[in-house]
Image: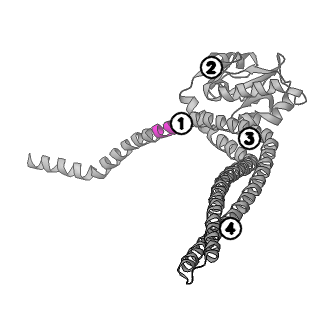
């Protein structure tokens, strides 16, 4: 029994590395599953990110177009605000000059008033002296009395003039304060107008770079969007065309903009697996599941590989007919503009457009 137990322990010990290898190998699928889950999470966010990127691009395009239209008026406004500021500056400068003059006048008037008061004091002293002088002289006293009255009258008149100069100065200060306030407001308005023009010019100038960056971001996300759609997707209809919800807004925007340009677009989007199989058969593919797309009378992807099956591809039509020639006005419009909406042409099929070009 002891020997048997020893042998079993030895066998387990010897098998240790192999068991460890098996356990490690067993962990690989779990790690792979975790990696797949992480990839699925990234992919799941890709669709939202792609749609948000395109929407942001459209919003920025609309905003930039509006700024471009408004820019001449913004520049005119800035020039007008500049003229207002110049006028306000002149008015403030003039008001400052008037106030400075009023300050000097008030100073002079109060100096004259002070001089008159001092002269009145001297006249009164002279009167006292005249009255005390012996022998008394009525004539001298009368003259001194008249001088005092004249001096007092001058003090009173100059006091009135001084007070008037103070009132004038107060008024000029009020007017200057109002002019300064208007100048500050005009300066602020001009600065704001200038900054608005500068912002608009900068925004307009940066649009090509921003557009390219957002387009590149959408392109970078497109494969992840497809990966997501292979796992889970939902569809909706845009003007009767069933498409993946991720591209719905962008597709609708493209159809609307084409219509504004005089090009009527529509198409066939989503297909079920059964519809893809039926299409393979009707298009004469040698084998539904294995024959390459190019072997069919009309190139048709193997079921499970077509982006139509996840609503990310559209076979475009115009005026009810498939766009089957690159010479058509519809194809030329698509070739020039579809990229702005995130759609790329499959080179072998003028009608086939998707977010990856496949």
Residue lying at 57% horizontally and 75% vertically, measured from the top left: 127
Contact? badges 4 and 1 (CB < 8 Å): no
Residue 64 is marked as: 3
**Which residue in the structure is indicated by mark 1?**
45
Element under disc 4: helix
Q: Over which residues does the magenta segment extend?
A: 36-45
Element under disc 2: strand
Contact? badges 1 and 3 (CB < 8 Å): no
Mark 1 / mark 2, whichever is N-terminal: 1
Overall secondary structure of the magenta section: helix
Mark 3 / mark 4, whichever is N-terminal: 3
Where is the C terminus found, in terms of image quarters?
Answer: top right
Q: Is the residue marked by circle 2 packed among few (<14), some (14-19), or many (20+) residues within 10 Å?
A: some
**Which residue in the structure is indicated by mark 2?**
236
Give the number of the mark in front: 2 or 3: 3
Q: Nearer the viewer, residue 150 or 349?
A: 150
**Which residue in the structure is indicated by mark 4?**
104
């Amino acid at each position: 029994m002891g020997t048997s137990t020893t042998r079993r322990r030895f066998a387990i010990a010897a098998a240790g590395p192999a068991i460890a290898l098996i356990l490690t190998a067993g962990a690989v699928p779990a790690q792979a599953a975790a990696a797949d889950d992480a990839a699925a999470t990234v992919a799941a966010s890709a669709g939202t990110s792609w749609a948000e990127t395109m929407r942001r691009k459209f919003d920025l395009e609309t905003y930039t177009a509006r700024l471009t239209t408004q820019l001449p008026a913004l520049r005119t406004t800035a020039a007008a605000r500049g003229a207002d500021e110049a006028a306000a500056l002149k008015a403030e400068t003039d008001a400052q000059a008037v106030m400075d003059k009023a300050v000097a006048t008030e100073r002079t008037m109060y100096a004259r008033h002070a001089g008159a008061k001092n002269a009145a004091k001297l006249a009164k002293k002279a009167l006292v002296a005249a009255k005390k002088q012996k022998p008394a002289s009525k004539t001298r006293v009368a003259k001194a009395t008249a001088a005092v009255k004249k001096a007092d009258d001058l003090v009173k008149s100059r006091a009135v003039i001084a007070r008037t100069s103070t009132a004038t100065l107060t008024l000029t200060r009020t007017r200057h304060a109002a002019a300064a306030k208007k100048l500050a407001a005009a300066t602020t308005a001009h600065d704001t107008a200038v900054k608005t023009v500068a912002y608009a010019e900068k925004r307009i100038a940066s649009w090509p770079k921003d557009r390219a960056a957002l387009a590149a971001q959408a392109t970078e996300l497109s494969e992840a969007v497809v990966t997501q759609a292979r796992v889970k997707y939902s569809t909706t209809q845009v003007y009767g065309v069933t498409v993946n919800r991720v591209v719905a807004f962008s597709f609708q925007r493209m159809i609307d903009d084409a219509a504004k340009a005089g090009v009527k677009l529509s198409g066939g989007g989503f297909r079920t697996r059964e519809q893809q199989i039926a299409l393979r058969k009707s298009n004469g593919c040698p084998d539904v599941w294995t024959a390459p797309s190019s072997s069919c009378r009309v190139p048709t992807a193997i079921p499970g590989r077509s982006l139509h099956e996840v609503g990310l591809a559209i076979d475009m039509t115009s005026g009810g007919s498939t766009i089957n020639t690159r010479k058509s006005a519809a194809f030329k419009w698509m070739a020039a503009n579809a990229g702005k909406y995130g759609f790329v042409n499959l080179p072998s099929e003028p009608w086939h457009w998707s977010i990856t070009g496949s």
